[in-house]
Image (cartoon, rainbow, N blue to C red):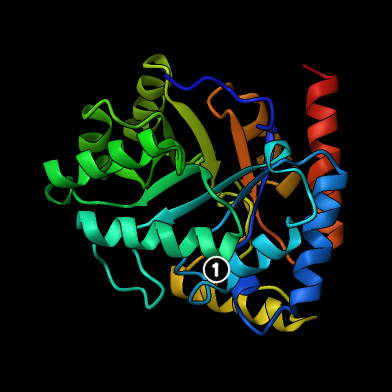
Amino acid sequence: MFERPPAFSRLGFGVAGPHGTPLVSRGATSTLIQAALAGGITVFDTGPSYGRGEAERRLGAALAGHGRSTVFISTKAGIGEDKSRDFSAASIQASLRRSLQRLRSDYVDALYLHGPAPAELTPQLLQALRDEKASGRVRHLGIAGRGSEIDAALETGLFDLLMAPVHTGLAQDDLDRLHAARKAGIGIVAIEVLSGASAGLRWPRSAADVWYSARALRQRKLAPPRQPARQALRHALTQGLADCVMISTTRAKHLQDALHTLDESQHNA
């Protein structure tokens, strides 16, 4: 069962996507992370596959001057720096060690397996995860995924966090899965909360916008937005499923808009 730590904010910031590439400077990433901290965000997520570890390095550098107990840092394993897939026990443990070095930390608050298939959840892997948690290098174990692929992981009873899409376009099966996880005491970190609000392509005012537009093309999200972004974020914050709602942006204004939406949702709760 997930017991919410003190440093577990309702809004989280994902250091991923363009933050692992030269499209966004290290200084710009650091500035956004500091702004997130100033706005009360204490949950930060990243992963080794984002820019071959660059996103982790940026997050570690930006948080180096802050008390470790005041932030909740999560990363992932299973998809490596070169985006190769390996869920063997040895690979997961080696990936964690490299992540800790880049994050400049002795432990992560959460380690998410990055979309494992049921057959990849071997007894050896599950035991290795137990060992890492017992050692203190991992405080919480989680699964990052979508759809039925997460069912087998949750059935093991080993994981106490689930990172999954939460938005207005979810199928009923996905909603039922989230409700079941919550009923079982599993913490839920919402991702892709703006899926129903994204217009896909945006006028490229920065190099990072080119990255987002390319992703939209790959995902074929070219339809007009179904609802404003603030409304989509407010839905994720207030529907009662997510313990933390993860956002990621390269623009200070978008971050401030998200913080304002959080304030509004808490005020009207």
Residue found at x 41% / y 47%: 112
Q: Quadrant of the C terminus?
A: top right
Residue 167: name its quadrant. top right
- In the image, is 109 to the left or to the right of 113? right
What is the secondary structure assignment of the residue under circle 1? Answer: loop
User: Position of 112 compared to 147: left or right?
Assistant: right
Q: Position of residue 22 (x, y in %)?
A: 66, 85
Residue 54: percent from the left, percent from the top? 58, 74
| Quarter of the picture holding the N terminus | top left
Residue 86 appears anywhere in the view: yes
Q: Residue at x 32, y 55 (%)?
A: 93
Name the residue rendered at 58%, 28% in the picture.
Answer: 243
Q: Nearer the viewer, residue 149 or 49?
A: 49
Nearer the observer, 140 or 205: 140
Q: Amino acid at mark 1?
A: Leu
Q: Which residue is mark 1?
A: 222
Relative height, residue 87 to residue 206 (above, below)? above
Question: Quick one: label 1, few (<14), some, or many (20+) residues within 10 Å?
Answer: some
User: x, y percentage for residue 97?
Assistant: 42, 59
Q: Is residue 237 above or below residue 254?
A: above
